[in-house]
Image (cartoon, helix red, strand yellow):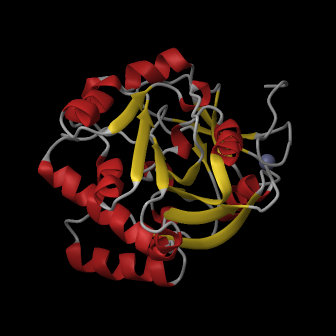
Amino acid sequence: MKDYKCIICGNTSFLPLFKKGEIKQFHLHKCPDCSLEFLYPVPSETVLEECYNISYFSKRTDRGYDNYFSDNIRNEIERVFKLNIENLGFKKLSKNCGNKGRSLDIGCAAGYFVNYMKNAGWDANGIDVSAPCTEFAVNELKLSVKNGNYLKTEYREKFDLITMWATIEHLRKPEKFIQKIHSDLKEHGQLYLSTCRTGIFNFKIFFSKNWRYYNFPEHIFFFTEKNLKKLLSDNGFKIIKYRTYGSGINSKYRFLKTICDYAAKLFFSGDMMIIAAEKKAGNQ
Ligand SMILES: [Zn+2]
């Protein structure tokens, strides 16, 4: 991997960690300088396209969803993103935009968040690589959602808010997405992002290789809090809010899960993190 550079710190030598899953060629590596973890070789677009066929969203596996289009999954997803935007200061942003901002959800899947924003009065848009999902969003929910790769998509108007819920860990080139998001936002526009979290003070430590987010090859990058904040600030963003949540304790241990989830949030030790970042003024 001589030609590979750490996307956070530029380092060129890495520690191999382990391989896992059905496709054994992808090996988790760690940067010894900044602790970023990533799969190498980086899965090709063809491999990823095969992963995101309809079965990822409709058939239970250890990686995908039971039935992404069911009411249960939809309700759970809505519960989480409502909580997330509340924690990230959405009310204030919405007020500043007169409740009529323009938003884009990257990796929008079936468009549940786009639908929420549309109902809140926003000019709400979405994009996703999965055709079955975007067809559902367009045909069933009547949303403004495109099918395709965000990096290859041009938008005529800029956005007040761009969101990426649990999407950045799936990307082959996260830094390119952050750069394009920066140029697609209005001045003072905001990016809301959630992703799984590695690093210290983390419930992840109890699960080792069996951590719930070590899904290879769909999840390619695993960031620490520092990694993510550096990636954003190096690309013209100011961090506004940061929170963590989630312990990963199985819901069959309901009492333990409730306590651990509460502790994860209170002590910033969750294995998921959410961040709000603003495009810096004068930084086009
Ligand atoms: Zn690094």
Quarter occupied by residue 147: top left
Q: Position of residue 137 (x, y in %)?
A: 27, 36
Q: Residue furthest left?
A: 71
- The answer to whether residue 266 of the structure is visible from this angle is yes
Q: Is residue 248 left or right of residue 115?
A: right
Which quadrant holds residue 117?
bottom left
Give the side of residue 54 with respect to residue 149, left or right: left
Residue 284 vs 280, above or below: the answer is above
Image quadrant in which you'd find residue 91: bottom left
Q: Residue at x 64, y 43 (%)?
A: 184
Percent of width and height locating residue 172: 61, 31
Name the spot of residue 22 as percent of width and height, x first. 40, 26
Query: Residue 28 placed where, x, y %?
Result: 61, 38
Residue 246 visible in the shown view: no
Residue drawn at the location 42% of the way across and 43% of the way down: 125
Q: Nearer the viewer, residue 56 or 86?
A: 86
The front one of 53 and 279 is 279
What residue do we see at 58% from left, 38% from top? 18
Q: Residue at x 46, y 64 (%)?
A: 206
